[in-house]
Amino acid sequence: MKNKLHEKKAVITLILFFMLGCSVHNQEANSEIDNKVKNLLSSMTLEEKVGQMTQVDFAVIGVPEQLNADNPIDQARLEDAVLKHHVGSILNAPYTPHSKAQSIETWRKMMQTVQAVAAKSRLKIPVIYGIDAIHGATYTQNSVLFPQAINMAATFNPELSFREGEITARELRVSGLRWNFSPVLDIGRQPLWPRLWETYGEDVHLATVLGASYIKGHQGDDFSAPDKAATCLKHYVGYSFPINGKDRTPAWIGERMLREYFLPTFEAGVKAGSPAIMVNSAEVDGIPGHANYHYLTTILRGEMGFRGFTVSDWEDIKRLYTRDKLAASEKEAVKIAVMAGIDMSMVPFDFSFYDLLLELVKAGEVPLARIDEAVSRILNVKYQTGLFEPNTPVLPVEGNFSTPEAIETNRQAARESIVLAKNANNILPLKKESSILVTGPTANLLSVMNGGWTITWQGDEENLYPQNKLTVFEAIQLKSKGKVTYIGGNSFTDKIDSQKAVEEANNHDIIVLCLGEKPYTETVGNIDSLNLDQTQLDLARAMLATGKPVILVTLEGRPRIITTIAEQAAGVILGFLPGMEGGVAIADILYGDYNPNGKLPISYPRNTNDIVLYDHKPIESYELNSYKPLYPFGHGLSYTTFQTSGLKVEKNQIDSGENINISVNVKNTGLMKGKETVLLYLNDVAASVTRPNKQLKAFKKIELDPGQSENLSFTLTPYDLSFIGVDLKRIVEPGDFKVMVGNETVLFSVTKNQVKYKWLM
Ligand code: BGC
């Protein structure tokens, strides 16, 4: 053990030296790039500059799908975009609106074609091509597709998030792609929102740690390296908290809440080195994201010090006029957005932004200095990405794409992302000999495990999914030594013959009932209620009425209400969207070939209007109010048991500028080896702004053999003790603090006068 620790320390020291070296190297590289950008900018025409700020969809340069032999690009249209309109960026996969995964060869050819045309332009400025590779290289056929972010959050494992970033970047580079519209750093605090699953859940600390880790894996210290790619944080900021739960509808977030819950993940993403940020498609407090100078410039630039560029979301500058009625014309919309701080417009289907911005600058309505600023940022990122280095070879397929190691990492991520929520009388793990009836609309489909942004935008074209991956039913069938029968359809909406299922149930020992949602993303996924549809409820009722033990497995992007089913089911497995290896991972857990350790990164509501989150304010659990979710944040069972004890703070009193060390023992008190995540919560006992009952401030995941124990230590910094004060500045106030781990609570106090921090740290 000791040796291992020494080894670990040595590795960390090496990494620190390396990072120090890198940061000196990075500073030099930065000033070199700044000079190159200055030179290039000085030789650009206004048209070339405005073109750099324009991003168009693939549709603008594509041939119709039917005419595509193996290169989907229309040369003349591409030349019109890049040479005539000087377009600096293109996005998306062929073919809009389906945007469908292409082969590695097609991508390579497309990227060569695009850059070859860019190389014919007067200044040979390369195009930056962006793609939504949010859980792996979505749009490259047969890529490794990970669990979605909500599942990655359930792993509580930053190393897996790092590995996901690494593998995604590598597979993008194999495809010739270098810029990923990921990670989503919105906080998932509105369960109805159809993009909840794209987030790392409701907790700020967890999302911050996992998001930063993903970026580091994806970019390394230099995202121009042959196996790295640039990221893009999204959707800055407040997008995820629509009051009515529908995508692209208003959020009402006060400045304190914004700073405390919604900005920290983005701040961490900026610090982790992400060079681009995509903007909130909706509005906060009456101001559309694309018109919000305060967020885009005062905070993002002035406070966070972000040096990369901002890109609008889909058509959102136009929408300031067409939808929001904030601008009186499309031209005014362009002016508002650019002056608020948008550097690049995802137009996406025409050159209107280019034309209108040119007019605005010529009329003196948008100063040239603002254009120069935006273009400098874009060129800077293009240099950093290595796009200016011609003929960079693509990463070879061999050893870099869909490797057995990457698939195994994906499988491990899926296993660690699945939450065992209920296991009455240890019904699980199942005996391999048991006969099993598998039924339900999510039992035999790959799409329901992957969700949106999988092969296509909505992820719902099951026929495009790889044949060699296993659904839940297929994975159970493969492992079982007993009879396995499937009653269900071939698509999510196919009618299931519940009469037949009831008859079959009588011939089997156990029912595995798979419910949930079909794939979706964005507005397409809007719902009016978290309740499951009646067809699924009827099937569940029929299965429960058979009296056979029911194991409920959910595959869904958000917590659909399962309360009455879960109460009667013998076991409940919350699968969320575990990705391509989800079927295997669920079967591993069902049969005990893997000991589950996923924990809920959200509060699972008991009822559809029961939206109280774990870090609620005292008033939300006062008198008649209460936090009574079906399953709380952090819930997740194992086939073994763990006990934490001996929670200790190193000092009972600290100064407000000091760190505090905390330790706790954790022991595997059961009979099976397993992983446990120890969650450390904090509560500021009395403060000038109401504080949450508890907030996650640290966590550690460890693996223990039966009987084995480990002493874990944590350090909380002043930042961890701070909050956004009455004057909207981050502050640590003197007084008592409670530390909570498992069933234990210890107190310490902070003395001395209150210390104010710049909110960034
Ligand atoms: C989504 C973004 C995405 C973009 C490009 C938008 O509709 O909101 O998340 O990156 O499209 O595909």
Image (spheres, rainbow, N blue to C red):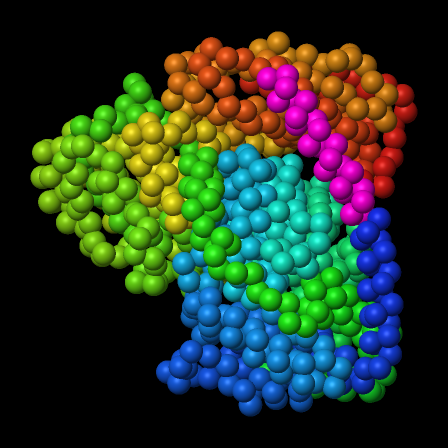
Viewer-nearest residue: 349 or 318: 349
> Which residue corresponds to the image point at 50% horizontal and 36% vertical from the top-left?
155
- Vertically, is 507 above or below 399? above
Asked if residue 20 lies in the magenta stretch, the reply is yes
557 horizontally vs 259: left or right? left
Measured as percent of width and height from the top left, residue 700 is found at 59, 27
Asked if residue 470 lies in the magenta stretch, the reply is no
> Which residue corresponds to the image point at 83% horizontal and 76% vertical from the top-left?
41
> Which residue corresponds to the image point at 44% horizontal and 14% vertical from the top-left?
706
69 horizontally vs 234: left or right? left
Asked if residue 399 shows in the view, the reply is yes
> Which residue corresponds to the image point at 74% horizontal and 47% vertical from the top-left?
271
Q: Start and end of the magenta stretch?
A: 1-23
- Vertically, is 507 above or below 70? above
195 horizontally vs 607: left or right? right
Q: Quadrant of the N terminus?
A: top right
The residue at the far right in this view is 753
Total of numbered circles in the picture? 0
299 horizontally vs 714: left or right? right
Quarter of the view holding residue 70: bottom left
Q: Quadrant of the C terminus?
A: top right
Most common SS among magenta residues: helix
Measured as percent of width and height from the top left, residue 697 is found at 66, 30
Asked if residue 351 shows in the view, the reply is no
Quarter of the view holding residue 737: top right
- Vertically, is 742 above or below 405? above
Measured as percent of width and height from the top left, residue 430 is found at 26, 27
Measured as percent of width and height from the top left, residue 137 is found at 50, 58
